[in-house]
Amino acid sequence: MSTRGRIGILNDDGTVDSIYCHFDNYISNNGKILQEHYTDPAKMAELIALGDISSLAAEIGVQHPFDNPHRYDTPEYKEFEAQYRGMVKAYGRDRGETGIDAVHHATVDEFRAFSCGAEFWYLFCDGEWMVSYWSDQGFENLEDVIAREAAEQAA
């Protein structure tokens, strides 16, 4: 199973460029990664330029094999994981797929309505992350949502 999502950046003209992310888009994973590691517009542009991704990580990284080619629990497997685990896994860059380019949306509403089986929509705008999830609700400040979820977990 996967928790699918879209990650977008709001452009100065009100349009949005976004990519699909297949895995782990829930707030406590991809939400936190975006909030902690993707607040630089240049880094966000680099992420969007990758096109659709399988999984998000703290670092965009470099081209690498999409799957670990080594047998599980071997020294080679562990070395591969140590080298590449903290990097984004991109369909185009790392697996050679085509047709995975970012999508350009005319409006934020069009971005939110884009049908790709997403359960989370992350939008970087004016230096802040916003999130919309699960239903047709609007966007909320991601930092506030992370704090709310942390308080709920602590209660």
Image (cartoon, rainbow, N blue to C red):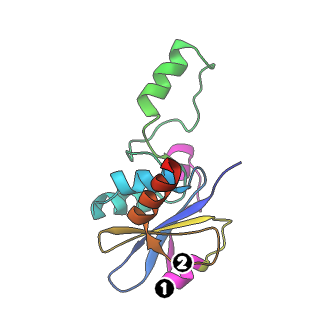
Range drawn in magenta: 90-112
Q: Residue at x 66, y 73 (%)?
A: 115
- Residue 113 at least partly seen: yes
Q: Which mark is residue 107?
A: 1
- Position above or below: 83 against 107: above
Q: Which mark is residue 95?
A: none
Q: Which residue is mark 2?
A: 111
**Tag 2's secondary structure?**
helix
Q: Nearer the viewer, residue 134 or 75?
A: 134
**Tag 1's secondary structure?**
loop
Q: Residue at x 52, y 50 (%)?
A: 153
- Position above or below: 34 against 18: above
Q: Is residue 48 magenta?
A: no
Marks 1 and 2 close (CB-CB < 8 Å)? yes
Q: Is residue 111 magenta?
A: yes
Furthest-front residue in view? 155
Q: Residue at x 53, y 35 (%)?
A: 65
Percent of width and height locating residue 102: 50, 67
- Residue 101 at least partly seen: no
Furthest-top residue in view? 75
Specify whether 123 is left or right of 120.
left
Specify whether 92 is left or right of 3.
left
The amino acid at mark 1 is Thr
Q: Quadrant of residue 95?
A: top right
